[in-house]
Amino acid sequence: MSEQQPKDAGLRSAEVTEGADRAPHRSLFRAAGLEDDDIHKPLIGVANSWNEIVPGHVHLDELAEYVKEGISEAGGTPLEFNTIAVDDGIAMGHDGMRSSLPSRETIADSVELMTNAHRFDGIVALASCDKIVPGMLMAIARLDIPAIVVTGGHMAAGEFDDEPADLASVFEGVSKYNEGEMTEDELYALECNACPGEGSCAGMFTANTMACVTETLGLSWTGCATVGATDTRKRTIAKQSGQEILRLVEENIRPSDLLTRESFENALMVDLALGGSTNTMLHLPAIAQEAGVDVTLEDFDEVADRTPHLAHMSPSGPWRMEHLRDDGGVPAVLTQLSEQLHLDRPTVDRKTIGDRIDEAEWGGAVVQPRDDPVHEDGGLAVLRGNIAPDGAVVKAAAMDDEMRQFEGHARVFESQEATLEALDGGEIDPGDVIVIRYEGPRGGPGMPEMLEPTSKVSGSPRLSGTVALITDGRFSGATRGAAIGHASPEAAAGGPIALVEDGDTIEIDVDEGRLDLAVSDEELRERADAWTPPTIEATGVLERYAAMATSASTGGILEAPDRTASTEIRFE
């Protein structure tokens, strides 16, 4: 037998490394390259979403080396494994986008399965981009073992015509090209210069919103959210995170110690102050549910009423992530919200939220003062009415002020593809309200993002600021304009959005939180009596997702199985 001292029996990994019965397990660890000393140290899983497809992930293999170096130096054994990552930009505008939101559940499940199977004592998760960070956070909350998240960092802003550019600029450039506002050569130049290298897209889109949320929740290092992908400080954070996970294991500091009601309230405030992506209104409730905390659209509504929008970030404003970093990052936002925050909430780097505020350096260029905000209320808004009685969401920070109260006539489409055809054919006019339905979690299935139709509207001088869009699907974090998503219940589940007809008058009032169809209750009941549920055609993952997905108003999570159902043994 080895002369190595057995590890603390309280560690999970002792279940696969200690005692005579675990000789076969140790034999397999040796076959994977571990030696006696490695086997008897705490085993730390390094969950990595690296691949060669997604710009936000192509560098995570290198970043993982710094994490593993930190783990080894602190006395642990790092064991890296991978999970998937979908690039929403590449998946956008075609059937592949239906795979994006369901991938969140696959990521969470894969991290849970790998960690449970191999009895890791702790996890360092490396992730970037839209569904990957939420999926990792869901797994971390579900597993409730010591964990740290290293978000991969943003790409630098591009440049076009001496102005900053990013992915949203390219999507809107397509609309300008189609309308004769941009030449083919100009569009090509924009394409080549808007996304200059690795990292998540440069604006306050979903990936960077979730990075800021993760830092505020206390699960990533101070400054991690706004340090760029190629910045050497990101490597330092990666190594520090690897070192610190051993302390969390030793002291048994778990996600449940961090992911409390108060920490979620802090995260909501930062999200709203930054004018973050509407996708957080799917992801935060889903993460909270895994942590045993109830976060609802009502919470977003309530917190938005007392949280100002402080940073005019892309896609609606001029600032990108590098500008937010230079202005003090997430800690700078915290300084302006300090009177409302729960300052005693701990974080993974031995600091409280109050400590992070005390050490913050706020420049005042990007993050505006609390008493001089971009908008008095938060950057996201919840709307309700007879189209969406369970709620719909809009990135109010990215709307033109004149669209906050808007009335128009419905142009109804049963799919995103039909909408794009109408937009390309010049069939949408100022004053229209585009309604895209049967694109929710079940009806889509997969609740696809709709950056293409919103970009065609926002990028059109004729339609921008004069056309609204409502859907039971969702939008990219890069979307701007009067784009109202997550209409719940969705059409496929019998939601009232299924009853809208061409020509109906729709009334939008963001300030009052209203979204109404100017049709009598009697007429709606008659339409409901004539409505028949659609046949959802899907196979494989999407078929299972369509059968199990819940409403967007509850985060699009999967329904738990009925554990009370009785089972009878039957004989021939």
Image (spheres, grey):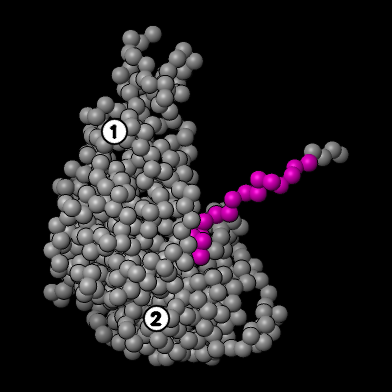
What residue type is disc 2 on?
A: Asp
391 on left or right of 63: right
Pointer 2: residues within 10 angstroms few (<14), some, or many (20+)?
few
Disc 2 element: loop
Q: Which mark is residue 323?
A: none
Disc 1 element: helix
User: Which residue is label 1 attached to?
Assistant: 247
470 on left or right of 353: right
504 on left or right of 279: right
Identity of the residue furthest to the right in this view: 572
What residue type is disc 1 on?
A: Arg
Q: Residue at x 28, y 76 (%)?
A: 375
Q: Quadrant of residue 360?
A: bottom left
Q: Which quarter shows the N terminus?
A: top left
User: Which residue is label 2 attached to?
Assistant: 511
Q: Nearer the viewer, residue 56 or 3?
A: 3
Residue 292 in view in this figure: yes
Q: Earlier in the sequence, mark 1 or mark 2?
A: 1
Q: Quadrant of residue 339?
A: bottom left
Secondary structure, magenta segment, majority class: loop
Q: Which residues make up the magenta segment?
A: 552-568
